[in-house]
Image (cartoon, rainbow, N blue to C red):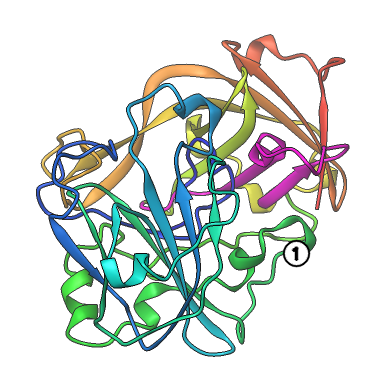
Amino acid sequence: MGRVQNSHVTPTDHQYIIPKETKSKSLVTDDPYRYEVRAPADGYIINIELFKEPVEINYQDQPYINNYLVFFEHSCTFYTRLIHIDTLAPDIEAKVEFRNAESQHPNAFPRIPVKKGQAIGTVGPHSFDFQIMDTSIKNKFIAPEHTQTWTLYTVDTFDYLAEPLRSALLAKNIKMTEPYGGKIMYDKDGTLLGNWRRIGRDASNSQYWQDDLSIVYDHIDPSQIQVSIGNFGGSPQAFSVRGNAPAPESVNKEKGMVVYGLAETKYYTESGELWDEIRFAKLSAKNSDYLVGTVAFQLESDRVLKMEAFPGKTADDVRGFTEKVVRYER
């Protein structure tokens, strides 16, 4: 949780679970019944969404199979979600009627009672997602109106897991520092640090992340600054900061224009091997040697930010902002 990548321009609000025998990042599998997925606690299934294609346009030309999001209500304040599971259990599927069944993302809103440990579907050997939301706890984003509703209430998974499951999963958790489940809220008022939304954005845009921007810290190695941009050269991309300075929480409106060199983030195991992003390992993040480009920031006020990206350019090439400057708010 907390990773910035592709359309997750702001820190990701769910865990990634990678089962044994996973070989690649693809959802496509010839063994969709490999693992049983069970209800995490007593409650009700209140929403099921069928993904017939990826939400992100740039993924829609890749191999893909149908998969499901299952949303559980456990109390009036406590919810969980499972995302990208391959099948629904027959007794669950029989109670589901999708609205707009011909659409690419039909939804159903049943109220199906489930018991802790009850089989609700299956998943093959590929990554799937898990999220816990507690509405009695609210993440203190500066502009909650610019944040997805359930992100506001997302909590650290490990704070809610019972033993012995908690210890078993912690032993295979790639984040070695607290909070072990990950961090999603970095906003610090009057500084560069945190999440931003483009001024003048189209609220009806289904590719909403194109208007997002975040300057945060790496989800695995919290010493590394990350810059995540919804539109960098035509697509959403996230980068490490060359030189890892200045710290974004130190950048305020008095600093003037700040320029960051951008590079790909690489993760290495303790033995110095490049991580394959699948197998468990103790990791550290490092910048690649290749400079992808440069980004310039300047706070016009505590909650208005100027940004301009310069793909393929070095800091020496940047003399100031041009007519392509973009303004963000929070």
Q: Position of residue 51 (x, y in %)?
A: 45, 46
Image-based side of 172 in relation to 329, left or right: left
Residue at 59 percent of width and 56 percent of height? 99
Question: Magenta segment, which residues?
Answer: 192-220
Measured as percent of width and height from the top left, residue 255 is found at 79, 41
Above or below for 296 versus 14: above
Q: Is residue 26 magenta?
A: no
Say which residue appears at 57% left-offset and 38% top-offset: 227
Position of 277 compared to 145: left or right?
left
Which residue carries the number 1 mark? 144
Numbered disc total: 1
- Looking at the rendered image, the quarter that the N terminus falls into is bottom left
Residue 23 in which image quadrant: top left
Magenta-colored stretch includes residue 209: yes
Query: Dot 1 surroundings within 10 Å: few (below 14), some, or many (20 or more)?
Result: some
Residue 29 occupies quadrant: top left
User: Which residue is more in the foreground, 69 or 290?
Assistant: 69
Q: Amino acid at mark 1?
A: Pro
